[in-house]
Amino acid sequence: MRRLAAVMGAAVLSLGLASGSFAASGGEDTIPLPDGFQPEGIAIDGTHFFTGSISTGAVYRGDVRSEEGTILVPGGAGRASIGLKVDDGRLFVAGGPTGQAYVYDAHTGAELATYRLTSEATFVNDVVVTPQAAWFTDSVNPVLYKVPLTQNGGLSGQSAVSTVPLTGDLRYQEGFNVNGIDATPNGKKLVIVQTNTGMLFTVAPHSGRTTRIDLDHERVRFGDGLLLDGHTLYVVQNFQNRVAVVDLESDLESGDVVERVRDGDFDIPTTVAQRGDRLYLVNARFTTPPTPQTEYWITVIHKPHEKD
Protein backbone atom coordinates (compact mmCIF):
# COMPACT_ATOMS: atom_id res chain seq x y z
CA MET A 1 0.00 0.00 0.00
CA ARG A 2 2.83 2.41 -0.68
CA ARG A 3 0.60 4.74 -2.69
CA LEU A 4 -2.14 4.82 -0.12
CA ALA A 5 -0.84 7.98 1.52
CA ALA A 6 -1.19 9.76 -1.82
CA VAL A 7 -4.52 8.13 -2.45
CA MET A 8 -5.76 9.26 0.94
CA GLY A 9 -4.59 12.81 0.30
CA ALA A 10 -7.68 13.09 -1.89
CA ALA A 11 -9.72 11.06 0.56
CA VAL A 12 -12.67 11.26 1.38
CA LEU A 13 -14.30 12.43 -1.76
CA SER A 14 -17.69 10.83 -1.84
CA LEU A 15 -18.38 8.53 -4.76
CA GLY A 16 -22.08 8.75 -4.13
CA LEU A 17 -22.41 5.03 -3.41
CA ALA A 18 -25.85 4.19 -2.10
CA SER A 19 -27.33 1.00 -0.82
CA GLY A 20 -28.43 -1.29 -3.60
CA SER A 21 -27.70 -4.59 -5.29
CA PHE A 22 -24.89 -5.18 -7.75
CA ALA A 23 -25.23 -8.23 -10.00
CA ALA A 24 -22.33 -10.37 -11.14
CA SER A 25 -20.93 -9.82 -14.61
CA GLY A 26 -17.42 -11.26 -14.32
CA GLY A 27 -15.98 -14.67 -15.04
CA GLU A 28 -15.96 -17.63 -12.68
CA ASP A 29 -12.60 -16.60 -11.23
CA THR A 30 -13.58 -13.00 -10.41
CA ILE A 31 -16.30 -11.33 -8.37
CA PRO A 32 -17.24 -7.79 -9.46
CA LEU A 33 -17.44 -4.90 -7.02
CA PRO A 34 -19.28 -1.60 -7.46
CA ASP A 35 -17.66 0.74 -9.99
CA GLY A 36 -15.64 3.49 -8.34
CA PHE A 37 -15.53 1.73 -4.97
CA GLN A 38 -11.74 1.85 -4.39
CA PRO A 39 -11.51 -1.31 -2.24
CA GLU A 40 -8.65 -2.39 -0.02
CA GLY A 41 -9.47 -4.93 2.71
CA ILE A 42 -11.39 -8.20 2.55
CA ALA A 43 -12.88 -10.58 5.11
CA ILE A 44 -15.12 -13.63 4.78
CA ASP A 45 -17.72 -15.02 7.17
CA GLY A 46 -19.58 -18.08 5.96
CA THR A 47 -20.76 -17.32 2.45
CA HIS A 48 -20.47 -13.56 2.83
CA PHE A 49 -17.47 -11.43 1.96
CA PHE A 50 -16.83 -7.88 3.11
CA THR A 51 -14.63 -5.22 1.55
CA GLY A 52 -14.09 -1.59 2.50
CA SER A 53 -13.64 1.61 0.51
CA ILE A 54 -10.43 3.56 0.97
CA SER A 55 -11.97 6.84 -0.13
CA THR A 56 -15.32 6.85 1.68
CA GLY A 57 -15.16 4.29 4.49
CA ALA A 58 -18.12 2.40 3.03
CA VAL A 59 -18.33 -1.38 3.51
CA TYR A 60 -19.72 -3.65 0.80
CA ARG A 61 -21.09 -7.12 1.62
CA GLY A 62 -21.54 -9.76 -1.04
CA ASP A 63 -22.26 -13.46 -1.43
CA VAL A 64 -19.45 -15.66 -2.74
CA ARG A 65 -21.95 -17.98 -4.42
CA SER A 66 -24.32 -15.58 -6.18
CA GLU A 67 -21.67 -12.83 -6.47
CA GLU A 68 -24.37 -10.28 -5.66
CA GLY A 69 -24.09 -7.74 -2.90
CA THR A 70 -25.04 -4.41 -1.41
CA ILE A 71 -23.56 -1.53 0.56
CA LEU A 72 -23.71 -2.63 4.20
CA VAL A 73 -22.18 0.53 5.69
CA PRO A 74 -22.64 3.79 3.76
CA GLY A 75 -19.59 5.98 3.23
CA GLY A 76 -19.19 9.36 4.84
CA ALA A 77 -16.94 12.39 5.07
CA GLY A 78 -13.88 11.87 7.23
CA ARG A 79 -14.06 8.07 7.07
CA ALA A 80 -11.79 5.45 5.55
CA SER A 81 -11.88 1.67 5.49
CA ILE A 82 -8.56 -0.11 5.04
CA GLY A 83 -7.97 -3.57 6.59
CA LEU A 84 -10.92 -5.38 8.12
CA LYS A 85 -11.74 -8.60 9.96
CA VAL A 86 -15.02 -10.22 10.91
CA ASP A 87 -15.35 -11.91 14.29
CA ASP A 88 -18.41 -13.14 16.18
CA GLY A 89 -20.81 -11.24 13.98
CA ARG A 90 -18.81 -8.00 14.24
CA LEU A 91 -16.75 -6.27 11.59
CA PHE A 92 -13.56 -4.55 12.80
CA VAL A 93 -12.22 -1.87 10.45
CA ALA A 94 -8.88 -0.02 10.39
CA GLY A 95 -9.41 3.66 9.63
CA GLY A 96 -6.17 4.62 7.86
CA PRO A 97 -5.22 8.30 8.31
CA THR A 98 -8.24 8.99 10.52
CA GLY A 99 -6.45 7.39 13.48
CA GLN A 100 -9.66 5.57 14.29
CA ALA A 101 -11.02 2.03 14.34
CA TYR A 102 -14.65 1.13 13.72
CA VAL A 103 -16.76 -1.85 14.69
CA TYR A 104 -19.97 -2.64 12.83
CA ASP A 105 -22.64 -5.28 13.12
CA ALA A 106 -21.78 -7.65 10.26
CA HIS A 107 -25.48 -8.41 9.64
CA THR A 108 -27.12 -4.99 9.86
CA GLY A 109 -24.21 -2.58 9.36
CA ALA A 110 -25.08 -0.75 12.59
CA GLU A 111 -22.12 1.01 14.18
CA LEU A 112 -21.26 -0.71 17.46
CA ALA A 113 -18.19 1.30 18.43
CA THR A 114 -15.69 3.91 17.25
CA TYR A 115 -12.26 4.00 18.88
CA ARG A 116 -9.73 6.82 18.78
CA LEU A 117 -6.42 4.96 18.47
CA THR A 118 -4.18 8.00 18.05
CA SER A 119 -4.33 11.72 17.37
CA GLU A 120 -0.87 11.78 15.76
CA ALA A 121 -0.09 11.57 12.04
CA THR A 122 -0.81 7.93 11.27
CA PHE A 123 -1.95 5.27 8.88
CA VAL A 124 -3.92 2.60 10.74
CA ASN A 125 -3.59 -0.15 8.19
CA ASP A 126 -4.77 -3.60 9.18
CA VAL A 127 -6.42 -5.53 12.00
CA VAL A 128 -6.58 -9.01 13.45
CA VAL A 129 -8.93 -10.19 16.19
CA THR A 130 -7.67 -12.71 18.76
CA PRO A 131 -9.52 -14.19 21.75
CA GLN A 132 -8.06 -11.39 23.86
CA ALA A 133 -8.13 -8.27 21.69
CA ALA A 134 -8.29 -6.57 18.31
CA TRP A 135 -4.82 -5.50 17.15
CA PHE A 136 -4.26 -2.70 14.64
CA THR A 137 -1.06 -1.88 12.74
CA ASP A 138 0.32 1.58 12.02
CA SER A 139 2.41 1.92 8.86
CA VAL A 140 4.17 5.14 9.89
CA ASN A 141 4.61 4.71 13.66
CA PRO A 142 6.37 1.72 15.30
CA VAL A 143 3.43 0.66 17.43
CA LEU A 144 0.42 -1.60 17.54
CA TYR A 145 -2.92 -0.48 18.94
CA LYS A 146 -4.73 -2.86 21.25
CA VAL A 147 -8.49 -2.83 21.76
CA PRO A 148 -9.11 -5.45 24.46
CA LEU A 149 -12.16 -7.68 24.49
CA THR A 150 -13.98 -8.34 27.74
CA GLN A 151 -13.88 -11.74 29.44
CA ASN A 152 -17.07 -12.77 27.65
CA GLY A 153 -15.78 -11.48 24.31
CA GLY A 154 -17.63 -8.17 24.38
CA LEU A 155 -16.37 -4.80 23.21
CA SER A 156 -14.41 -2.70 25.68
CA GLY A 157 -14.68 1.07 26.10
CA GLN A 158 -12.37 3.79 24.82
CA SER A 159 -10.47 3.91 28.12
CA ALA A 160 -9.22 0.34 27.59
CA VAL A 161 -7.44 1.16 24.31
CA SER A 162 -3.66 1.08 24.58
CA THR A 163 -0.61 1.69 22.41
CA VAL A 164 2.05 -1.04 22.39
CA PRO A 165 5.51 0.08 21.14
CA LEU A 166 7.23 -2.37 18.80
CA THR A 167 10.71 -3.27 20.04
CA GLY A 168 13.28 -5.92 19.17
CA ASP A 169 14.38 -6.71 15.61
CA LEU A 170 11.99 -4.41 13.73
CA ARG A 171 13.30 -1.00 12.65
CA TYR A 172 10.99 1.50 10.96
CA GLN A 173 12.35 3.17 7.82
CA GLU A 174 11.19 5.77 5.32
CA GLY A 175 7.97 4.82 3.56
CA PHE A 176 5.25 2.33 4.48
CA ASN A 177 6.40 -0.01 7.22
CA VAL A 178 4.24 -2.53 9.06
CA ASN A 179 1.20 -3.40 7.03
CA GLY A 180 -0.64 -6.75 7.26
CA ILE A 181 -1.15 -8.67 10.48
CA ASP A 182 -2.40 -12.10 11.50
CA ALA A 183 -2.22 -14.25 14.62
CA THR A 184 -2.06 -17.80 15.88
CA PRO A 185 -5.48 -19.18 16.88
CA ASN A 186 -4.77 -18.73 20.60
CA GLY A 187 -3.63 -15.14 20.10
CA LYS A 188 -0.30 -15.71 21.83
CA LYS A 189 1.79 -14.74 18.81
CA LEU A 190 1.18 -12.15 16.11
CA VAL A 191 2.73 -12.10 12.63
CA ILE A 192 3.38 -8.85 10.73
CA VAL A 193 4.99 -7.82 7.44
CA GLN A 194 7.11 -4.73 6.78
CA THR A 195 6.18 -3.54 3.30
CA ASN A 196 9.25 -1.47 2.47
CA THR A 197 11.83 -4.07 3.54
CA GLY A 198 9.97 -7.28 2.70
CA MET A 199 10.69 -8.70 6.15
CA LEU A 200 8.36 -10.78 8.31
CA PHE A 201 8.27 -10.65 12.10
CA THR A 202 6.52 -12.28 14.99
CA VAL A 203 5.30 -10.10 17.85
CA ALA A 204 4.82 -11.05 21.48
CA PRO A 205 1.49 -9.37 22.33
CA HIS A 206 2.25 -8.85 26.01
CA SER A 207 5.47 -6.90 25.35
CA GLY A 208 5.49 -5.77 21.72
CA ARG A 209 8.87 -7.41 21.19
CA THR A 210 9.46 -8.37 17.57
CA THR A 211 11.54 -11.24 16.21
CA ARG A 212 12.48 -11.41 12.55
CA ILE A 213 11.35 -14.57 10.78
CA ASP A 214 14.38 -16.09 9.02
CA LEU A 215 13.52 -16.68 5.36
CA ASP A 216 17.05 -17.73 4.38
CA HIS A 217 17.85 -14.43 2.62
CA GLU A 218 14.49 -14.26 0.85
CA ARG A 219 12.25 -11.18 1.05
CA VAL A 220 8.56 -10.52 0.44
CA ARG A 221 8.83 -6.93 -0.76
CA PHE A 222 5.62 -4.96 -1.16
CA GLY A 223 4.11 -7.34 1.40
CA ASP A 224 0.57 -6.29 2.21
CA GLY A 225 -2.21 -8.55 3.52
CA LEU A 226 -1.33 -11.73 5.43
CA LEU A 227 -3.15 -15.02 5.92
CA LEU A 228 -1.75 -17.49 8.45
CA ASP A 229 -3.21 -20.94 7.80
CA GLY A 230 -1.59 -23.42 10.16
CA HIS A 231 2.12 -23.29 9.31
CA THR A 232 1.51 -21.79 5.86
CA LEU A 233 1.66 -18.03 5.53
CA TYR A 234 0.26 -16.34 2.43
CA VAL A 235 1.74 -12.89 1.79
CA VAL A 236 0.12 -10.61 -0.77
CA GLN A 237 2.84 -8.70 -2.66
CA ASN A 238 0.70 -5.88 -4.00
CA PHE A 239 2.73 -4.03 -6.65
CA GLN A 240 4.39 -7.29 -7.71
CA ASN A 241 0.96 -8.80 -8.47
CA ARG A 242 1.64 -12.08 -6.73
CA VAL A 243 1.19 -14.07 -3.54
CA ALA A 244 4.20 -15.50 -1.74
CA VAL A 245 3.64 -18.85 -0.05
CA VAL A 246 5.81 -19.34 3.03
CA ASP A 247 6.25 -22.66 4.83
CA LEU A 248 6.91 -21.79 8.48
CA GLU A 249 8.44 -23.96 11.15
CA SER A 250 6.20 -24.78 14.11
CA ASP A 251 7.73 -22.02 16.25
CA LEU A 252 7.19 -19.48 13.42
CA GLU A 253 10.80 -18.33 13.80
CA SER A 254 11.91 -19.42 10.33
CA GLY A 255 10.49 -20.56 7.04
CA ASP A 256 10.96 -20.95 3.30
CA VAL A 257 9.31 -19.13 0.43
CA VAL A 258 8.20 -22.16 -1.56
CA GLU A 259 6.11 -20.52 -4.25
CA ARG A 260 5.14 -17.14 -5.70
CA VAL A 261 1.77 -17.24 -7.40
CA ARG A 262 0.58 -14.93 -10.16
CA ASP A 263 -2.81 -14.64 -11.82
CA GLY A 264 -3.90 -12.81 -14.94
CA ASP A 265 -6.71 -11.12 -13.00
CA PHE A 266 -4.42 -9.57 -10.39
CA ASP A 267 -4.26 -5.77 -10.57
CA ILE A 268 -2.41 -4.76 -7.40
CA PRO A 269 -4.08 -7.17 -4.96
CA THR A 270 -3.86 -5.90 -1.41
CA THR A 271 -5.45 -8.35 1.01
CA VAL A 272 -6.57 -11.97 1.13
CA ALA A 273 -9.20 -14.10 2.85
CA GLN A 274 -9.98 -17.78 2.58
CA ARG A 275 -13.02 -20.00 2.28
CA GLY A 276 -12.49 -23.71 1.95
CA ASP A 277 -9.75 -24.41 -0.57
CA ARG A 278 -9.99 -20.99 -2.22
CA LEU A 279 -8.33 -17.64 -1.63
CA TYR A 280 -10.12 -14.35 -2.30
CA LEU A 281 -7.96 -11.32 -3.14
CA VAL A 282 -9.27 -7.79 -3.60
CA ASN A 283 -7.61 -5.69 -6.31
CA ALA A 284 -6.98 -2.05 -5.37
CA ARG A 285 -5.72 -1.02 -8.84
CA PHE A 286 -3.52 1.74 -7.41
CA THR A 287 -1.93 2.52 -10.78
CA THR A 288 -5.33 3.13 -12.39
CA PRO A 289 -6.73 6.65 -11.84
CA PRO A 290 -9.91 6.25 -9.75
CA THR A 291 -13.12 7.57 -11.25
CA PRO A 292 -16.77 6.79 -10.51
CA GLN A 293 -16.63 4.44 -13.53
CA THR A 294 -13.43 2.58 -12.62
CA GLU A 295 -14.05 -1.16 -12.36
CA TYR A 296 -12.93 -3.19 -9.36
CA TRP A 297 -13.11 -6.89 -8.57
CA ILE A 298 -12.07 -9.78 -6.33
CA THR A 299 -9.85 -12.50 -7.80
CA VAL A 300 -10.55 -16.06 -6.67
CA ILE A 301 -7.80 -18.69 -6.83
CA HIS A 302 -7.31 -22.18 -5.45
CA LYS A 303 -4.96 -22.43 -2.50
CA PRO A 304 -1.59 -22.85 -4.20
CA HIS A 305 0.07 -24.85 -1.44
CA GLU A 306 -0.64 -26.44 1.87
CA LYS A 307 2.01 -27.84 4.19
CA ASP A 308 1.57 -31.46 5.26
Image: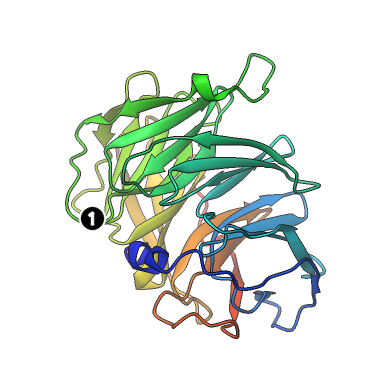
Q: Is residue 64 visible?
A: no
Seen from the viewer's position, the closer of residues 293 and 69 is 293
Q: Is residue 122 visible?
A: yes
Q: Could you tell me which residue is drawn at 60 percent across and 86 percent down? A: 293
Q: Could you tell me which residue is drawn at 31 percent across and 34 percent down? A: 143
Seen from the viewer's position, the closer of residues 181 and 102 is 102
Considering every residue shown, the one lying at the far front of the view is: 77
Q: Which residue is disc 1 drawn over?
A: 218
Q: Could you tell me which residue is drawn at 53 percent across and 80 percent down? A: 265
Seen from the viewer's position, the closer of residues 122 and 174 is 122
Does 96 appear above or below 241? above
Query: Which quadrant holds the N terminus?
Result: bottom left
Image quarter of residue 255: top left
Residue 253 percent across, percent down from the top left: 31, 34
User: Given the image, on which type of amino acid does mark 1 rest?
Assistant: Glu
Element class at badge 1: loop
Residue 235 percent across, percent down from the top left: 41, 55
Residue 20 percent across, percent down from the top left: 81, 69
260 on left or right of 218: right
**Colouring convention used in this rendered image of the protein:** rainbow
Does 116 appear above or below 177? above
